Image: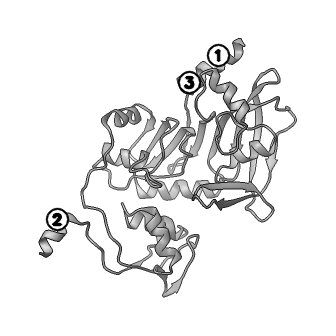
Amino acid sequence: MIAAMTTTTPPTSGVQLIEVAPELAGQRIDNFLITALKGVPKTLIYRILRKGEVRVNKGRIKPEYKLQAGDIVRVPPVRLPERDAPVPVAQGLLQRLEDAIVYEDKALIVLNKPAGIAVHGGSGLSFGVIEAFRQLRPDTKELELVHRLDRDTSGLLMIAKKRSMLRHLHAALRGDGVDKRYMALVRGHWATAKKQVNAPLLKSNLRSGERMVEINEEGKEALTLFKVLRRFGDFATIVEARPITGRTHQIRVHALHAGHEIAGDTKYGDENFSKEIRELGGKRLFLHAYALTVPLPDGGELKVEAPVDEVWARTVERLSAS
């Protein structure tokens, strides 16, 4: 009877006591659990955190708690997915992501993520970029996202192939060592003198579970530097956005705050402007991470750029002609 049950239902783990290794010090408990409980839905991970079932040094903690070397993490029994179950990623998408790689070495992958593809599974999605790459690189056991991009944002995304590279890049991101540049097509005439938006951001969840961000003095400090790249009369502007901080939806909300919503932004955009851009063939969010400079562990520097997709290029061409 037990054998029959184990073939049809995912196994359940027992209570685990995990000592935090020195190299994991500074990592948030939620991210630690996402890695430790591979394949367990994030909703379940946050539920056991919320209910106090996860303990650190026998005490309750919040999801943003940062681990210290030597901490003892108690992980309650959770239902695990089938072991060795392949990620159901379509071959066409796998090939598309393989073709999107702009840089790869023994420790790092950088790809030009297409718009519309989530970076990881969850919230109703069975897979994302990281699950696809675990299928593409089955022998690379330590693949992890270095950072994230919104599902509808395209552009440069880093995936670490080694834990040492992940730690190095996380330290660089915390210390402002990584330079990320985005392009955005925004509504109206962006003044050359408007070079930055410095406004705190506060996250909230709607009753539907959707995450929204707003300018709020009680939020976290957020700074974005902007530069005009190209204008289309008073109708639209392409700006470069350089986020100095890395808050959720930062560029999108700061563009809204500046009075220049990003084309195709269904959460914070201007529907009339987005509709006009769609009529030109621009059916996407016009935010693209196009340039990236990162320090390498050996003291060198990696600089990569990613071209925009055909939809973006064609829309800009039609804007120029109108």
Numbered badge on residue 7: 2
Quarter containing the C terminus: top right
Seen at 30% across and 74% down, the residue is 13
Q: CA distance from mark 1 to mark 3?
A: 10 Å
Q: Is residue 29 above or below residue 243?
A: below
Q: CA distance from mark 1 to mark 2?
A: 56 Å
Residue at numbered disc 3 = 311
- 166 left or right of 268? left
Contact between marks 3 and 2 (CB within 8 A): the answer is no
Asked whether residue 127 appears in the rendered view, the answer is: yes
**Which element is circle 1 on?**
helix
Q: Examine the image and state in which quarter residue 73 appears.
A: bottom left
Q: Residues within 10 Å of mark 3 (few under 14, many from 20)?
A: some
Residue type, numbered disc 1: Glu
**Which element is circle 2 on?**
helix
- Residue 115, position as x, y percentages in the image: 52, 36
Residue type, numbered disc 2: Thr
**Which element is circle 3 on?**
helix
Seen at 69% across and 18% down, the residue is 319
Residue type, numbered disc 3: Val
- Residue 300, position as x, y percentages in the image: 54, 44
- Residue 89, position as x, y percentages in the image: 33, 43
Contact between marks 1 and 3 (CB within 8 A): the answer is no
Residue at numbered disc 1 = 317
- Residue 133, position as x, y percentages in the image: 37, 45
Residue closest to the far bottom: 58
> Who is closer to the viewer here, 86 or 267?
267
Contact between marks 1 and 2 (CB within 8 A): the answer is no
Q: Residues within 10 Å of mark 1 (few under 14, many from 20)?
A: few
